[in-house]
Amino acid sequence: MVVDGKLHGGEITPYPSAGLMTNSDPAVLAQMGRSWDLGQSWFLRTPQSGWRAAYQAMLRRHVEALGTDPIPVLA
């Protein structure tokens, strides 16, 4: 939600509107992506065991490989 030019997150999911959003401002979506740091998620900050530990390690490597700003700046 954008109020007075500021982005406020409510329920943010990987696939809002089932991935079928067609009316959102690309700049707003890019800013949402930049604000969502998976490295700070509970899953990556909390020790996991079993298959979750393996998935956590793969996900952490992927997130780290993306770098600090994997979202291209839109002109």
Image (spheres, rainbow, N blue to C red):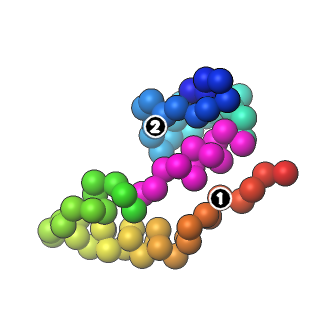
Q: Is residue 48 above or below residue 27?
A: below
Instruction: Please check the rendered image and state whether residue 17 is part of the magenta-colored stretch, yes or no.
Output: no
Please name the amino acid that badge 2 sits on: Ile
The residue located at (56%, 71%) in the rendering is 67
Q: Residue at x 42, y 76 (%)?
A: 61
Element class at badge 1: loop
Q: Residue 4 or 21: which is nearer the viewer?
A: 4
Residue at the spot x=28%, y=57% of the render?
43
- Magenta stretch mostly in which secondary structure? helix
Q: In the rendering, at what x and y percent does residue 4 appear?
A: 65, 24
For the point 15% across and 68% down, which residue is it?
Answer: 49
Quarter where residue 6 is shown: top right
Secondary structure under the numbered disc 2 in the rendered image: loop
Query: Which residue is labeled 2 in the image?
Result: 12
Q: How many marks?
A: 2
Instruction: Identify the residue under disc 1.
Output: 71
Q: Nearer the viewer, residue 12 or 1?
A: 1
Q: CA distance from mark 2 to mark 1?
A: 17 Å
Left/right of residue 8 with respect to residue 47 in the rendered view: right
Please, is residue 27 above or below residue 75 in the view? above
Q: Are marks 2 and 1 in contact (CB under 8 Å)?
A: no
User: Looking at the image, is mark 2 or mark 1 earlier in the sequence?
Assistant: 2
Magenta-colored span: 27-38
Q: Is residue 53 above or below residue 23?
A: below
Numbered label attached to residue 29: none
Residue 7: percent from the left, percent from the top?
58, 34
Q: In the image, residue 66 lies at what x, y percent?
A: 55, 70
- The residue sitting at the top extreme is 3
Say what amino acid the circle numbered 1 marks: Ile
Q: Quadrant of the N terminus?
A: top right
From this viewpoint, is residue 22 visible?
no
